[in-house]
Image (cartoon, grey):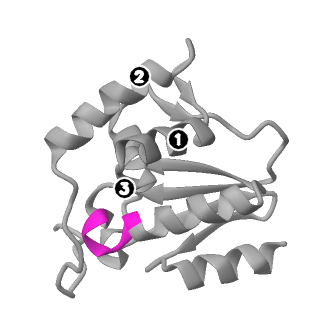
Amino acid sequence: MAKLPTRSPTHEDVPLARLSSMGLELEELAGDDGAITLPALVELAEDRGRPASHYLAAVALATELAIAPPDRDAPLEIVVCAGTCQRYGALDLLDHLVTKWQNAPAFRLRTVTCLDRCDSAPTCELRGAHGQLVVAPATAATVDEAINSLS
């Protein structure tokens, strides 16, 4: 049985063809290991006039690409579903996290296509020394609260 939210979608998915073409753009930025720095991704998004969240969703679909960790050790990793969760606000959450990261890069950001909690979309996980904290449904406010409680 599919795990789908009982509420109606609030957002539109980025078309798969667009995400695929964005993935090709990202491949040009990636190092030999397939890693793309978040500042480079944000700069590309700004140059193309697209939200950074769309490029992060493209990274989730591309199995050979990943967001490079920040230069300094970040004790927290935030993993955001950018698959079905797009329909429920995951892209807004990603844009919020990018802005938060730009102000203070105290975490690693990673996107995946599914966290298997579709009934509570959008979903994210905060992973660190504390273990794993699931925030679902995740909003900018609930994720900020979770981050602050772990600090």
Q: Which residue is mark 3?
A: 82
Hey, what amino acid is under mark 3? Ala
SS state under label 1: helix
Q: Tell me the crowding category of disc 3: few under 14, some 14 to 19, or many 20 or more residues within 10 angstroms, Cα based.
A: many
Q: Left or right: where does residue 130 sit relative to residue 63?
A: right
Instruction: Look at the image and tell me in which quarter the N terminus lies.
Output: bottom left
Report the front residue among 65 and 128: 65
Where residue 145 sits, quadrant-wise, is bottom right
Tell us which disc is closer to us: 3 or 2: 2
Q: Left or right: where does residue 145 sit relative to residue 106?
A: left
Hey, what amino acid is under mark 1? Glu
Residue 87 belongs to magenta span: yes
User: Which of disc 2 and disc 1 is earlier in sequence?
Assistant: 2
Q: Which mark is residue 27?
A: 2
Report the front residue among 8 and 97: 97
Where residue 31 sits, quadrant-wise, is top right
Rendered residue at 67%/58% (across/down) = 101
Q: Is residue 49 above or below residue 3?
A: above
The spot of residue 60 in percent (x, y) is: 39, 43
User: Which stretch appears magenta?
Assistant: 86-91
